[in-house]
Image (cartoon, rainbow, N blue to C red):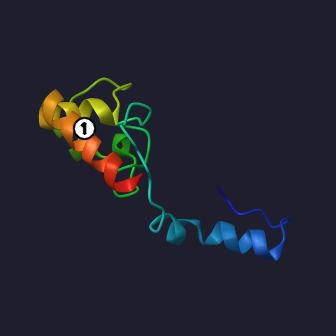
Amino acid sequence: MKVPRECSWVWRNVLYMRKTAKQFIKYAIADGTSTSRWFDPWCKGQILWDSNEAKAHLSMLQDATVCLLLKEEFGDKQFTIFLSAAQDRYS
């Protein structure tokens, strides 16, 4: 998005700094059921759909979630234990 000249000095500078600020944003994905594997920036602030390397390694449907990725990686039982421990720790 191009920064409009009509906006205030403050908003213009906020828009200029978006790329820098983006690296400091953290995403809470909870159990991952509502976080898109491909289109949400949950992995190092990047959208995986834009990465050819990710597409080559993660062959999944476009509507796949992070939850599905974690269950594939850890299995249902280990994922449930991991999620339970994370919820206890961060609740």
Q: In the image, what residue occupies the spot 40% across and 56% down?
A: 45
Tell me where residue 14 sits by quadrant.
Answer: bottom right
Q: Is residue 9 rendered to the left or right of residue 80?
A: right
Q: Quadrant of the N terminus?
A: bottom right
Q: Number of labelled discs?
A: 1
Residue 7 image position (x, y, % from top left) = 83, 66
Q: Nearer the viewer, residue 69 or 52?
A: 69
Disc 1 secondary structure class:
helix
Q: Nearer the viewer, residue 71 or 25?
A: 71
Q: In the image, what residue occupies the spot 21% across and 46% down?
A: 53
Q: Is residue 14 rendered to the left or right of residue 34?
A: right
Residue 60 image position (x, y, % from top left) = 25, 27
Tell me: residue 60, above or below residue 57: above
Asked if one can make out residue 87 in the rendered structure from this viewpoint, the answer is: yes
Q: Nearer the viewer, residue 85 or 76?
A: 85
Q: Is residue 22 rendered to the left or right of residue 75?
A: right
Q: In the image, what residue occupies the spot 15% across and 30% down?
A: 77
Label 1 sits on residue? 55
Q: Nearer the viewer, residue 16 or 39?
A: 39
Tell me where residue 62 sits by quadrant.
Answer: top left
Residue 5 image position (x, y, % from top left) = 81, 67
Tell me where residue 84 sits by quadrant.
Answer: top left
Residue type at the position of mark 1 = Lys
Q: In the image, what residue occupies the spot 24% across and 34% down?
A: 69
Tell me: residue 15, above or below residue 32: below
Asked if one can make out residue 58 in the rendered structure from this viewpoint, the answer is: no
